[in-house]
Image (tube, rainbow, N blue to C red):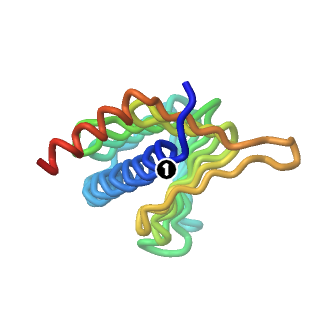
Amino acid sequence: MKYNPVCQLIILGTLVFSFGLQAQAQSLAADQDINAPISISAKSTFVDGVSKMSVYEDDVVIVQAGLTINAARLSINASAGEGQEVFIANGAPAKFTQLLDDGTIVTASAREIRYSVITRTVSFEGDAQLSQNTSVVNSESIEFDLINKQLVAKADNAKGGRVTTVFQPEVLKQQIQEQQDDNN
């Protein structure tokens, strides 16, 4: 089916508006999750109090409120001090799941998932994929800034890669209808 330019602008505007709302919802859920206790389980744990490094290996599960990460390995670097920790989960792939306040689920996977407390960013490196509802972003790396609610996906130019985003038209039609219902 071919769209005329006006339809394309309406769809593009809806996509931008939709992702803006989704990012706000994700940020809100992330704000609530960040203050919840963190539970880490693994088959092996190593903690070095002098260097302030922790390493968890083999079937690592991290849970914080509605957020879960499954990985083969997790390292936590707290050497920069409290509030500046960096969490790095590795796997083949490591998997991220977050239940948002509106009941939708965001899933992501990558060879490395990194969370920086001080910058409030989550990055997915190596065959990264991020999904919400029926929309999917595939890229070599994806970074989500929780403060500014911005997502940046980058391809590996050395490999001739590209960023691929798939939006399902049925979801767009439903969102437009919901917006129209809200306006009436």
Residue for badge 1 = 9
Left/right placement of residue 57 relative to residue 20 reads right
Q: Residue at 35% across / 42% down in the picture?
A: 67
Residue 48 seen in render: no
Under circle 1, the secondary element is helix
Front one among 112 and 174: 174
Furthest residue toward bottom: 81
Q: Nearer the viewer, residue 12 or 120?
A: 12
Q: Position of 46 compared to 174: left or right? A: right
Q: Farthest residue toward the left?
A: 184
Residue at 46% of width from left, 29% of height from top? 168
Q: Is residue 66 above or below residue 50?
A: above
Comparing 139 with 18, the one in front is: 18
Q: Residues within 10 Å of mark 1 (few under 14, many from 20)?
A: few
Left or right? Give the position of 88 relative to 140.
left
Q: The disc labelled 1 sits on which kind of residue? A: Leu
Question: Which residue lies at the image location 16% right of the left edge and 42% below the top edge?
Answer: 181
Residue 107 falls in image quadrant: top left
**In the image, residue 165 lies at what x, y percent?**
58, 39
**Whole-percent x and y of residue 18?**
37, 48
- Percent across and percent down for residue 7 are 47, 42
The reply, left or right, for residue 130 in relation to residue 27 is right
Q: Picture coordinates of residue 37 (x, y %)?
A: 27, 52
Which residue is farthest right? Answer: 158
* Closer to the camera in the image, 149 or 33: 149
Where 153 falls versus 138 (above or below)? below
Q: Which quarter of the rendered picture does the N terminus lie within? A: top right
**Going 62% across and 51% down the picture, which residue do you hit?**
153
